[in-house]
Amino acid sequence: MELSDRKKKILCMAIEEYIKDCSPITSGGIKDVTSLNCSTATLRNELNALEAMGFLKQLHTSGGRIPTAQGYRYYVENLLEGATASEKELDEVKDLISSKTSSLNEIVTGIAKIVSKATNYPTVIMVDGVDNLVLTDFKIIPLLEDKVMVLIGTIAGYINQTLDISASVEDCNNASIYLTKHFKGETIGFMIDNIDQFEEGMKSEIEAFESVVNSLISGLKKLNSQRYLNVRREGSGKLLENKNEVESAKKVLDVLDDEKQLSSIMELEGKGDIEVTIAGDGESCSVVKAPIKVDGRQLASIGVIGPQRMDYAGIASALKVVIDNLNNLKGE
């Protein structure tokens, strides 16, 4: 629906003021915070028109107006066209993802924690693209009690696996050299799909440590088939601070405890870098989410979850920082 420039400005300002302090919007309030050269009566007419168009609604006949789901949706769609990364908010993201010694789990947990802290809303990361990670190296180390530890290096951090097998130091070293030699620069998915033909073609080279490789591949297949959800609840308490929105906050907190519902919410539709779902009246939550890509390949999705009244601009900015920095990671 096309709006005049004045209506756009009034609607965006009205929504931003409501997000800020949860106070219903009045023509007098809009006049105080805008530089529009028009009377209170004109502003009242514009608010009436926006209400008739479905962007605002009145809770009481004589009271101010609040945004509708349609109003939030229009605001977000226009907001995201110019979403930019705010470097000053999340500089620590760069330090986290540039670390060459962090595990994938530490990086995922750290990113979720940083975004949740920056936005003051619960944040969820769903890792479901492990097969897209590009390999850099392998380190295989024998442990006590018939176990082997495998450090799988990727450009997004290492993956740690413990295998229940017995292997000598020599076999572990040979397996590390073999796997790094043949799969450095390839994805985990390529390795899983093609390991059989490598074994057939180089039986003499791999035979002594075949059990190590087979167990490793089995573990990677299992990891790849699972969705890993990391839920950070920083900001959950703030949702309950507004007594007028306690019920909405409780619905959001219930969603955070429902893994099946969370997985569904975190699915991306492929519409762009940042996707927004606005909670309709009576629905559980809104979510601002984005794909996490490394070297152009999708690894996970990250989402900030909250009630209909959320700071969409701040959240979009925080997510933009994360996805921009991760997208800049390149394979060696």
Image (cartoon, rainbow, N blue to C red):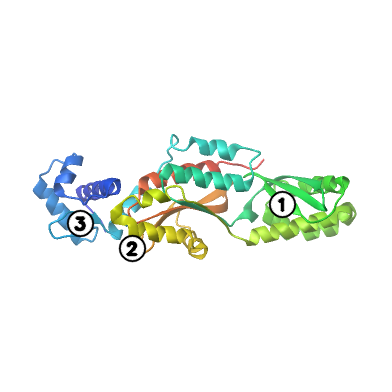
Tell me the residue at 79%/45% (across/down): 141
Neighbours of disc 2 within 10 Å: few (<14), some (14-19), many (20+) = some
Q: Residue 264's x, y, as percent? A: 49, 63
Quarter of image, res 153: top right
Mark 2 lies on a secondary structure that is: loop
Locate the C terminus by quadrant: top right
Residue in the foreground of this view, choosing between 41 and 116: 116
Locate the N terminus by quadrant: bottom left
- Of callouts 3 and 2, which one flags the residue occurring earlier in the amino acid sequence? 3
Q: Residue 152's x, y, as percent? A: 71, 47
Q: In this figure, which residue is indicated by the disc labeled 1?
A: 161
Tell me the residue at 64%/43% (across/down): 331
Can residue 327 be seen here? The reply is no
Q: Residue 221's x, y, as percent? A: 69, 60
Q: Marks 3 and 2, how far apart in space?
A: 18 Å
Q: How many marks?
A: 3
Q: Marks 1 and 2, how far apart in space?
A: 43 Å
Q: Residue 29's x, y, as percent? A: 17, 45
- Which numbered disc, 1 or 2, marks the residue closer to the eye? 1
Q: In this figure, which residue is indicated by the disc labeled 2?
A: 280
- Which numbered disc, 3 or 2, marks the residue closer to the eye? 2
In this rendering, the answer to whether 324 lies above or below 247 is above
Mark 3 lies on a secondary structure that is: helix
- Which numbered disc, 1 or 3, marks the residue closer to the eye? 1
Tell me the residue at 47%/53% (across/down): 303
> Which residue type carries mark 1?
Gln
> Which residue type carries mark 3?
Leu
Quarter of image, res 255: bottom left
Q: Label 3 near label 1: C-beta < 8 Å?
A: no
Q: Using residue 290 as the reference point, say whether residue 158 is left or right of it.
A: right
Q: In this figure, which residue is indicated by the disc labeled 3?
A: 50
- Of callouts 1 and 2, which one flags the residue occurring earlier in the amino acid sequence? 1
